[in-house]
Image (tube, helix red, strand yellow):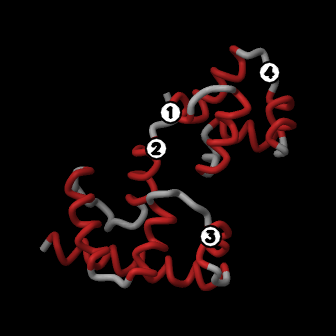
């Protein structure tokens, strides 16, 4: 079952409408509908809020490792056939080649699933700088993986 289906199942078992859940989360009913149909996926911080409002564990809604892998897979070359364990090894190796700040920014985004705004506040840098650094790191990681696959 995907995240949206899980949210819908828990919500309906608790006899909540989409509108009622949306009000509790301070979002639109349309956004809840998009999550439930799979048109959009809630950010990690929102998944945590949803879990609190529905009084379930985050793990009941989603396996964090699935989201981490999904996010990291966006940084990988197309048709990359590495397993999760192999990606972990390559990622650790890549992060060792980066400075502390770059490594921490990358981990904040792709492991701790922070959004750019949260990262900006955590590191006290402009959000546009976060976007630029992460864009470059994704490209460098992609190139690093390609080189390792040769």
Q: Which residue is mark 4?
A: 16
Q: Position of residue 148 (x, y in %)?
A: 17, 73
Question: Is tag 4's residue or tag 2's residue first in the polypeptide sequence?
Answer: 4
Question: In this rendering, is residue 62 above or below 83?
Answer: above
**Number of the front mark, 1 or 4:** 1
Q: Which residue is mark 2?
A: 64
Question: In this rendering, is residue 113 above or below 133?
Answer: above
Question: Is tag 3's residue or tag 2's residue first in the polypeptide sequence?
Answer: 2
Q: Nearer the viewer, residue 43 or 125?
A: 125
**Mark 2, other Cα within 10 Å: few <14 / some 14–19 / many ≥20:** some
Q: Which residue is mark 1?
A: 59
Residues at marks 1 and 2 touching, judged by CB atoms closer than 8 Å: yes
**Mark 3, other Cα within 10 Å: few <14 / some 14–19 / many ≥20:** some
Residues at marks 4 and 2 touching, judged by CB atoms closer than 8 Å: no
Q: Determine the secondary structure under disc 1.
A: helix
Real-space CA distance between mark 1 and mark 2, rounded to the nearest whole angstrom: 7 Å
Question: Is tag 1's residue or tag 2's residue first in the polypeptide sequence?
Answer: 1
Q: Is residue 75 left or right of residue 28?
A: left
Question: Is tag 3's residue or tag 4's residue first in the polypeptide sequence?
Answer: 4
Real-space CA distance between mark 1 and mark 3, rounded to the nearest whole angstrom: 24 Å
Q: Position of residue 11 (x, y in %)?
A: 71, 23
Q: Which residue is mark 3?
A: 116
Q: Position of residue 120 (x, y in %)?
A: 64, 75
């Amino acid at each position: 079952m995907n995240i949206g289906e899980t949210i819908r199942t828990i919500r309906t078992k608790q006899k909540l409408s989409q509108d009622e859940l949306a009000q509790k989360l301070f979002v639109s009913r349309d956004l809840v509908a998009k999550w439930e149909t799979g048109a959009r996926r809630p950010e990690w911080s929102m998944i945590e809020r949803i879990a609190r409002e529905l009084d379930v564990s985050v793990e009941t809604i989603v396996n964090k490792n699935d989201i981490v892998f999904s996010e990291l897979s966006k940084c990988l070359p197309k048709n990359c056939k590495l397993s999760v364990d192999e990606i972990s090894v390559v990622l650790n190796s890549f992060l060792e080649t980066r400075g502390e700040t770059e490594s921490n920014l990358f981990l904040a985004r792709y492991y701790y699933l922070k959004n750019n705004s949260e990262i900006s506040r955590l590191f006290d840098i402009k959000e546009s700088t976060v976007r630029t650094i992460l864009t470059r790191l994704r490209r460098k990681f992609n190139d690093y993986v390609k080189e390792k696959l040769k």
